[in-house]
Image (tube, rainbow, N blue to C red):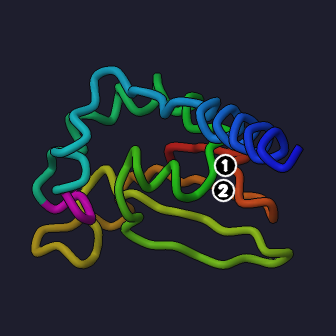
Amino acid sequence: MLRSKWLNLAAIAFFTFSCGKSLPELEGIDPQAWKDDRNGCTRKRESMADAIKREKNKLLALNEMEVIKVLGRPDRNELFKRNQKFYYYFLEPADECAEHGEAPKKLSIRFNAMGLAKEVVVE
């Protein structure tokens, strides 16, 4: 009796943890080059801007940790009212770079209070 309970528990745990969704692959984007180009200073992200515009909807409904696995740590983040968060990834050199523009393009991801990406915009 005790043995069957443990087997049932092990089977449930196995199926629960093995059925996770896979992370999306963003076509036309080199993940390592994207992550290495913090704040867009080396302009590698700038060459991937068109691809990120096409593929941005694949990021919807991912949680914060999944977005970080796909795109790396954000260049900036912002905590907004009602526990909403924004992650920003600069596509053009930001203010922290030696050569920067006045209003650099950036990828903006808004997370709802549940921590899921609700809106992805290139601005």
Instruction: Say the numbered circle drawn on residue 110.
Output: 2
Q: Position of residue 23 (x, y in %)?
A: 48, 34
Question: Which quadrant: the N terminus?
Answer: top right
> Residue 45 sits in which quadrant?
top left
Magenta segment range? 37-41
Q: Is residue 1 magenta?
A: no
Upstream in the sequence, badge 1 or badge 2?
Answer: 2
Q: Out of 110 and 67, give the one closest to the viewer.
A: 67
Q: Decide: is 80 above or below 35.
A: below
Q: Decide: is 97 above or below 71.
A: below
Label 2 SS: strand
Q: Nearer the viewer, mark 1 or mark 2?
A: 1
Residues tagged 1 and 2 counted as in contact (Cβ below 8 A): yes
- The residue lying at 21 percent from left, 34 percent from top is 30
Which residue position is annotated with label 1? 117
Left or right: 31, with 86 as reference point:
left
Q: Position of residue 16 (x, y in %)?
A: 71, 38
